[in-house]
Image (tube, rainbow, N blue to C red):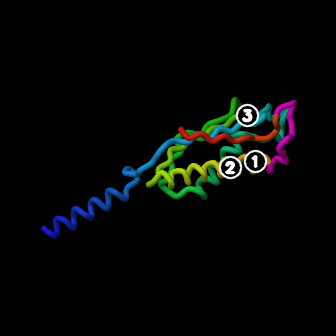
Amino acid sequence: MKRLFSSLAFVLALVAATPAFAQKSGGVRIEFQGPGGHSFGAYGRVSALHAAARTMILLQKALPAGSYQITNLTGGNSVNAIASDGLIELKLTARTAKAYDALVAAVTKAATDGADEENAFRGVKAGDLTAGAPATVRAKVTPF
């Protein structure tokens, strides 16, 4: 009987440790917006899709393995165009609501840093304009 209880306790501990039984999970959408343009006439402009790619690298470094799944990465308008938009969608999984909020904060920081890195790489500063529109890539994070 004692062995049965030990085995049962082991199985329950194992099940509780799996991500499928996490306390909190949800989706996060990261949207990037930039000026875009044709690659011939607007060479050197910031790319919203490049900012999304930079963010993906930062997410891999910032989030613990198994705490996220990338469900969508898309952007751009056509061939030979600098992307004016980019989108990343993630599913986050955490044991507690507090840990989930920490993941969302890390995603928000990675998105902001990814956009900032793309802007810095292209030498664009806040307030710069391209044809009257903001010349920077901007990131918006929305939990859903």
Q: Earlier in the sequence, mark 2 or mark 1?
A: 2
Q: Which of marks 3 and 2 precedes in the sequence?
A: 2
Contact check, label 2 and label 1, Cβ < 8 Å: yes
Residue identifier under label 1: 118
Seen at 83% across and 34% down, the residue is 40
Examine the structure image and report whether residue 131 is included in the region drawn in magenta: yes
In the image, what residue type sits under mark 1?
Glu
Of the image marks 3 and 1, the number of the one nearer the N terminus:
3
Q: Which segment did they paint magenta?
A: 120-133
Task: Please state which of residues 57 and 137 is positioned toward the viewer in this rendering.
Answer: 137
Question: Residue at label 3?
Answer: 84
Q: Quadrant of the N terminus?
A: bottom left
From mark 2 to mark 3, how far is it between C-alphas?
Answer: 15 Å
Which SS class for mark 1? helix
Q: Name the residue beneath numbered marker 2.
A: 54
Q: Amino acid at mark 3?
A: Ser
